[in-house]
């Protein structure tokens, strides 16, 4: 049975991106990039908005505020192009323009539940905050991983990741520091119906 990994890259204050900031906040170092290159092959899950953004990058569009891709960003997009991707959307047209992409019209939670029961390998989200939230609420997430870059984007941050989340208990399973500044933490998540007994109301 495949594992489902929710995987976020964030600022320290929990934003997925920031206006005017480059990919990885411009702070990806050699240790982090080497680690990225060692990650197992996965099938990536995303919603329509993330698909439109990332497929645009794959088609040559450059992020706002940049004149061109940096080599690290270009390599990341190329890797995604080669990977298997599943997009949950009722509005995208067939056939998808981005290579190795399958569009699924069915309910995302039920579709992922079926993928976990019948498939193999690793399933990993990319972006798609509302999709990740729905999969977590449904109890389908096996691993919850966050790589926090050493910036606070209080003035320019966009896409607050955890707004609308349920309460979640997190059991740490891995942690690591890259390049003396970037922190990875990985957890086994458990959605809570209420705060733990003994916790303040």
Image (cartoon, helix red, strand yellow):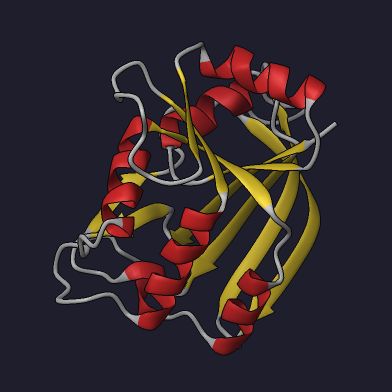
User: Of all residues shown, which one is farthest toward the right?
Assistant: 1
Rendering coords of residue 1 (x, y %): 85, 31
Q: Quick one: quadrant of the C terminus?
A: top right
Would you say 8 lies left or right of 17 here?
right
Residue closer to the observer: 108 or 159: 108
In this view, 137 is above or below 52? above
Residue closer to the observer: 175 or 77: 77
Residue sitting at x 79%, y 61%: 174
In this view, 67 is above or below 201? below
Would you say 164 lies left or right of 59 here?
right
In this view, 74 is above or below 93? below
- Residue 201 appears in the picture as rendered: no
Rendering coords of residue 175 (x, y %): 74, 66
Rendering coords of residue 168 (x, y %): 65, 32
Residue sitting at x 44%, y 45%: 127
Residue sitting at x 21%, y 65%: 62
Residue sitting at x 65%, y 30%: 200
């Amino acid at each position: 049975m495949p594992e489902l990994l929710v995987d976020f890259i964030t600022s320290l204050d929990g934003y997925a991106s920031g206006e005017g900031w480059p990919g990885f906040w411009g702070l990806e170092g050699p240790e982090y990039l080497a680690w990225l290159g060692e990650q197992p092959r996965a099938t990536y899950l995303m919603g329509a908005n993330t698909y439109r953004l990332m497929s645009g990058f794959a088609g040559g569009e450059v992020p706002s505020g940049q004149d061109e891709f940096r080599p690290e960003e270009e390599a990341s997009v190329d890797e995604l192009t080669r990977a298997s991707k599943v997009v949950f959307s009722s509005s995208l047209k067939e056939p998808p323009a981005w290579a190795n992409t399958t569009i699924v019209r069915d309910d995302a939670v039920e579709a992922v539940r079926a993928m976990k029961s019948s498939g193999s390998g690793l399933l990993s989200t990319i972006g798609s905050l509302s999709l990740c939230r729905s999969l977590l609420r449904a109890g389908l997430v096996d691993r919850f991983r966050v790589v926090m870059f050493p910036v606070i984007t209080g003035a320019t941050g966009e896409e607050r990741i955890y707004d609308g989340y349920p309460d979640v208990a997190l059991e740490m399973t891995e942690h690591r520091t890259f390049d003396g500044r970037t922190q990875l933490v990985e957890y086994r998540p458990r959605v809570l119906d209420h705060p733990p007994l003994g916790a303040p109301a």
